[in-house]
Image: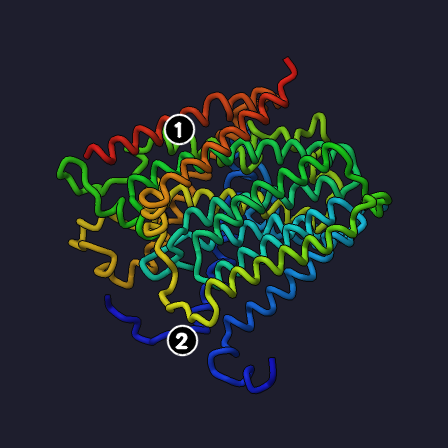
Amino acid sequence: MIQFAIEIPYWGQSLLRVLGGLVAVLLPAGTIVYLFLFKMMSFMQSRLGPMEAGPYGSLQLVAEVGKWMQKEDLAPDAADHRIFKMAPLIVLLSTFLLVVIVPFGPDAYFTNFSVGIFLGLAVASVSVLGILIAGWASANKYALLGGLRAAGQLIAYELPMVLAVLGVVIQAGSMNMQEITVAQNTGSWFGLDWFGSPFIVTQFVGFVIFMIAVQAELTQAPFDMPIAESELVSGYMTEYSGFRFLIFFIAEFATAGVFAFIASVLFLGGWGIPFSWFGWDNIDQVPDWMNLVGPLIMFTKMLVLTFIIMWVRFSFPRFREDQLQTFAWKVLIPLALLNTAITAILKVAF
Amino acid sequence: MNALILATDNVNVAQNVAFGIIAAVMIFAALSVVTTKNVVHAALWLVMVLAGVAAQYVLAAAEFVAVSQVLVYIGAVMVLFLFGIMLTRAQIGKETGLNNKGWALGIPVALVLFGLLAWVIVDAFGDDVLPDRGPAPTVMLSDQFLSIYLLPFIAISFVLLAAAIGAIVLARKD
């Protein structure tokens, strides 16, 4: 591999990775909120959305954040104050731990963990803790009900997500996110290698299950029973205001972005372009400029996937609680198990 | 342990310092689990202990086990704990009557368990220095599970299956 012109010391690399992590979490969150939540939803509802702050309302987000930041840090009298204040941070922490596994280029990764995707699935479940104790510590029936609903839903949809990822892991033969990326970009179909072999084609069932599970993990409509505003006010977020609400809000959309990053690595080929285009055989031959192009490719794929997530969110009515659980346990999990079994059989057969 | 030992090269390395810090946090959290006056707080302190175990696994270069620890204990067991507590009793603030009469019995049991584990580990390894091999590849782990340890692996799976079926049978009313 071509070395960097300047060798970056270890502390410099670490600093770059921390800054990169902040960008990789906050930039998608801001983009999703402005592009999809403010503008796309408005257009789908035949209105303009925010237009006053900045050109086409593009600075609306800055205004909103400013508004939230200056509000008083309120907590209900009966609440368990310390836990109440800690809960949003746990949710945000889970998002930051999640982005750690995403590779953005041959060298532009946060950590090249050998069990990457497994770590991702593990830390994704930490956010449930934050949501549960947020609901409990608010000392509010609506909040507690919302927290319990959220926990039940997240537990139910974690399983299909893990099982859907299993198909990809079997096909790639690795849990490392870089190796999964490389496997897709060096693969070929029946000797044709001009398009690599993104797993969305062979693992289409897995992809659909994964995206549905992501939708449910994010508690986005049609899976927004935990924050159903017509019955629970705002679920576990009812008592939160000011910057603690802002943290929940950022975490929700940042997690959408990070899950979209993970889905694009698992199913869409990640940062890579088919290696045969430039005659690369393996990751060591990928030149350094891919570290700059890779993040752009990832960002584009992330936008496409979050567009689908938001499109579904704005289009479908809410599932009832029992429909939601039945769908996970009786449809998604058996389907995902079947998909895993068929993938394993085909992997051994070919 | 005296200052001479601390000054030698092999003891005062980053891993050992980190081990000490994490272990201290874990002991503090473990004591808080049994002394706190609130059930939810006890569960949250237990999360700290289990997260500390995961951190110790990372220090021991056992990546897969560490991640499994987070997935199983923090992501599943503790969430179910909290879920169960919140469905039944979940007061905010101090609770009374959390201890039963036999609470003091726990102390000798814990000491005996600690002594037993310490003795087993010292007996098995003694002063052996484990080879510095770096993290064990997950492939190696799975190869072991699916070859020489296959029988115990399947036996444990059956135990878990029996437990799951038993839970369903107990929970169903009809």
Q: Chain under label 2?
A: A
Tell me: residue A327, above or below residue A290. Answer: above
Q: Position of residue A295 (x, y in %)?
A: 38, 54
Quarter of the picture holding the N terminus of chain A: bottom left
Q: Residues within 10 Å of mark 2 (few under 14, many from 20)?
A: few
Which of the two labelled residues, at mark 1 and mark 2, occupies the earlier sequence position? Answer: 2
Q: Is residue B89 left or right of residue B50?
A: right
Residue for point 18% across, 55% down: A280
Tell me: residue B129, above or below residue A312. Answer: below
Residue for point 83% across, 45% down: B101
Q: Is residue A310 visible?
A: no
Query: Tag on residue A347?
Result: none
Which color scheme did the rendering employ for the protein?
rainbow
Give the amino acid at mark 2: Pro
Quarter of the picture holding the C terminus of chain A: top left
Q: Which residue is mark 1?
A: A337
Q: Quadrant of residue A146?
A: top right
Q: Is residue A309 left or right of residue B31?
A: left
Q: Residues within 10 Å of mark 1 (few under 14, many from 20)?
A: some
Q: Position of residue A344 (x, y in %)?
A: 29, 33
Q: Nearer the viewer, mark 1 or mark 2?
A: 1
Nearest the viewer among B57 and A199 is: B57
Give the amino acid at mark 1: Leu
Residue for point 22% across, 47% down: A186
Q: Position of residue A26 (x, y in %)?
A: 53, 53
Nearest the viewer among A168 and A66 is: A168
Q: Which residue is mark 2?
A: A9
